[in-house]
Structures are given as C-alpha cells and as structure tokens.
Image (cartoon, rainbow, N blue to C red):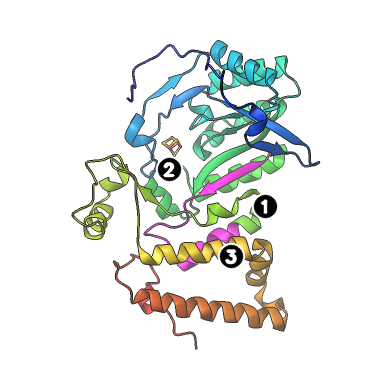
Amino acid sequence: VISLARQKFLVPDRAGMPEPSKYASVVMPGGEHRVAGSTEATRGCKHLCRHCPIVPVYNGAFRVVRARVVLEDIRQQVAAGARHITFGDPDFFNGPSHAISIVEAMHREFPELTYDVTIKIEHLRKQDALLPALRDTGCLFVTSAVESVDDAVLEKFDKGHTRADFLAVAARFRELGMTLLPTFVPFTPWTTLEGYSDLLGVLAQESLTENVAPIQLAIRLLIPAGSRLLELPEVARWWVRSIPRRSCFPGSMKTREWTLSRVKFLSWCSAAIALNFRARKFLGTFAAPQTRPPEIARRTRSRILYQRARRCRISMSPGIAAPSRWTFNSCPSGK
Ligand code: SF4
C-alpha cells in the first residue's frame, strides 16, 4: 500500500533486525571500518525529473520526518554500534533548514559521528552557503545524481542543472575540501561514442575518476511505468516500437529495461573499461595520444578495432535505430 498522505512518522522499531555490524561499513582513508547506520529526514521528492523512478510514485510530494524522530533513530543506531549515518533521503536539501538543523543537533550530540547525504546539483548550487555547515558537522561525502555531462540529455531528463553547474559544484567542493560522489546514467537512447568519451574526459579533468564507482559508467536508462520520459514524443514512439504487445507495460508497476541491443553492447564495453582496465590509465592513453608509447598505442588500436568489429556485428542484429550523431550502422570499418 502506498500512502502519500501526511503522516506522523514514528521512531523505527529496529528490534529483531541484524546488528548494524552485519551491514555495510564505511572504509576510512586510514583503513578504519566504520559501521554505517541509515535513516531518513524526509520521504519522497518535490522535483519531477523525467528519468527518475521516484516521480511515478511520489509525483512531486515529499514528507518531512520530525527532527525528534530522526535524532532518536540515530541515537538507537549509535547505541547499537553505528559510527556513520547514511541519510537515505532522495534529496537531503528538499528541506534545507530542516536538514541542517538535524545534522547540527546530531553533531552536537555525537561529534565523532560521520554521515553522508544525497543532494542534487541544482540544490548544491542554490544552497552554496550551507555547504560549509555540512563539512563542519562531519559530512564525509555528498552523492549527487549528475546523470550526464551533455546538456541536451540533461534537458530531456529535466534535471534542473547543466554541465556548467556540475563543473562549478565540483570546483566548489575542491575549494571547500569536500568530497563529491557523482552518479551517472551514461547509456541512454541519446548516447554517442563522442559523448561517452567526453564523460570520461570530464571525470579525468575534474580529478573525479576515483570518486565514481565503476558501475556508474555502465548504467542504462530505465523507464518504469508512469515515467515522465514517456512525455517525450520520440521516447513514446521508440517505446511502442520496442516493447512487444504481450508486455505488461503499462498496466503493471514492473520496471522494464530499455533493451536496445546497441545500448546493451555499449554497457558491456563500459564495464570492461571500468572493471578490467584501470580507468585512469585508459584515460591517459586517450588524453595524450601524441605521447603514447608505441606498445600502448598498438594495444589501444587493437582494442578500438575489436570494438568496431563487435559494434558492426551488433548493428546487424534486430533493434531500432539509435538517434545517434554517429549511427552504429555507419560505424567505420577500422581501416
Ligand atoms: S532525480 Fe533526485 S531530484 Fe530528481 S526527482 Fe528523483 S530524487 Fe528528486
């Protein structure tokens, strides 16, 4: 049952749950493992980003959990051994004053406790003045759904930020000595090879390679029932053409993956890059081709030829035409 009505949230009853040490822990730079707890200061989200799976459920509604309840929940988790708290709010700055009052109270009571939050780039820009307060109250890192560095894709997602905003936030975090963990949806129907290379280049230039989990370079766009992406005529058109009539969409809430074979292939390439090659080394070979040693140049060329061959093969498999600036059917022969 989903209820979006205003509620009087209670302190979660965690009795009977496995002790916090059985869950994930945060590994600090010195190697120390901190048991991580989790709580929420709000539920839902007031934004309507087109690609977001929260929107079909909450549709712009968000509900505040009273500070007293949140702090009591933190207290019981600290008593059980937690030394780090992850705030699971879809966006911690949907209610910035509420959020800051909670972390300040938490820090007063538990000065050694660290925490992490998720905040969208738009809010990080608008609430710039609150960032030092996060840092000074023990915020270890901020996760932010950047999704793309291509302004055209960001506009389709209705994300509320641009590439320039992301770069400004990255610079601000460096200035403040804070850690930004950007997340991405690199594989969409609008992804091009140039765009993907650009994303890797931006991460290298901004010294964010180590801050991006490898899986973030392999994520594909998901379109759940009720997604606002279906408002876009081209998406609705592709959707109808790519989903067989027997599909349960849209009568069910099951999530359907975008199953373009080419997108899937690019995803595999990405996983190979991220997991099997050291991303930084890979980027280095592309960032400075003129200084590439002959052996690396030879291996890089082999890799490119291999990818082109795979791509050409995949382009012959059934699927729909990707609206790419560099269409896969016209990919170079590799000569
Ligand atoms: S992507 Fe983030 S900000 Fe946008 S609707 Fe989803 S939770 Fe809210």
Looking at the image, in which quadrant does ligand 1 appear? top left
Circles 1 and 2: CB distance less than 8 Å? no
- Which tag is nearer the camera, tag 3 or tag 2? 3
Residue 193, x across and y down, in percent: 47, 67
* Front position in the image: 275 or 188: 275
Q: Read off the magenta span.
A: 178-202
Residue 197, x across and y down, in percent: 54, 65
Classify residue 243 by image quadrant.
Answer: bottom left
Precedes in sequence: disc 1 or disc 2: 2
Identify the residue at image location x=71%, y=14%: 109
Identity, as a three-letter code, of the amino acid under mark 1: Glu
Identify the residue at image location x=65%, y=57%: 205
Q: Which residue is mark 2?
A: 159
Within 8 Å of ligand 1, the CB of disc 2?
Answer: yes
Relative to 61, 274 lies left or right: right
Marks 3/1: CA–CA distance: 14 Å
Image mark for residue 210:
1
Classify residue 138 by image quadrant.
Answer: top right
Is label 1 in a helix, a strand or a loop?
A: helix
Classify residue 117 by image quadrant.
Answer: top right
Is label 3 in a helix, a strand or a loop?
A: helix
Residue 29, x across and y down, in percent: 77, 42
Q: Which residue is mark 3?
A: 273
Marks 1/2: CA–CA distance: 24 Å
Relative to 180, 185 lies left or right: left
Marks 3/2: CA–CA distance: 27 Å
